[in-house]
Image: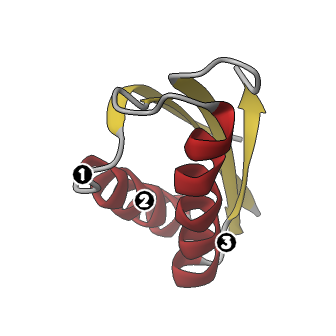
Amino acid sequence: MVTVVISLLLEFPPVSSLKEKRRILKPLLSGLHQDFNISIAEVDHNDELRRALIGGAVVSNSSSYGHQVMTKVVSRIENDPRVILADYRMETY
């Protein structure tokens, strides 16, 4: 059994309130969970207006499958015009 974990630092340049940030973040996380069957949540910078640290995980019997899923997650976020992917880190356990 392999667990692939990812942390993503997102930036929200146009937001002016935490409510607006969460209005963008909630459907993004929900969509990633539904489309890729991963566990994902905001894990840091919760009260910061223009940043969020997202943590995600997928469990699989194949390391390559886990990395493939997380690569698709990164690609989806990079192509979302509402957020900027500032940094990410992927680890395998």
Total label count?
Answer: 3
Give the residue displayed 24% in from the left and 51% down from the top: 81
Q: Say which residue label 3 marks.
A: 61
Say left or right for 40 vs 77.
right
Name the secondary structure under disc 2: helix
Of the residues under marks 1 and 2, which one precedes in the sequence?
2
Give the residue displayed 71% in from the left and 41% down from the top: 93
Q: Say which residue label 2 marks.
A: 73
Residue 81: image tag: 1
Farthest front residue in view: 16
Nearest the viewer among 1 and 38 is 38
Name the secondary structure under disc 1: loop
Amino acid on which the number 3 mark rests in the picture: Asn
Of the residues under marks 1 and 3, which one precedes in the sequence?
3
Residues tagged 2 and 3 counted as in contact (Cβ below 8 A): no
Give the residue displayed 29% in from the left and 56% down from the top: 80
Q: Is residue 47 above or below residue 32?
A: above
- Mark 1 residue crowding within 10 angstroms, few (<14) / some (14–19) / many (20+): few
Give the residue displayed 65% in from the left and 59% down from the top: 26
Name the secondary structure under disc 3: loop
Say left or right for 14 vs 5.
left
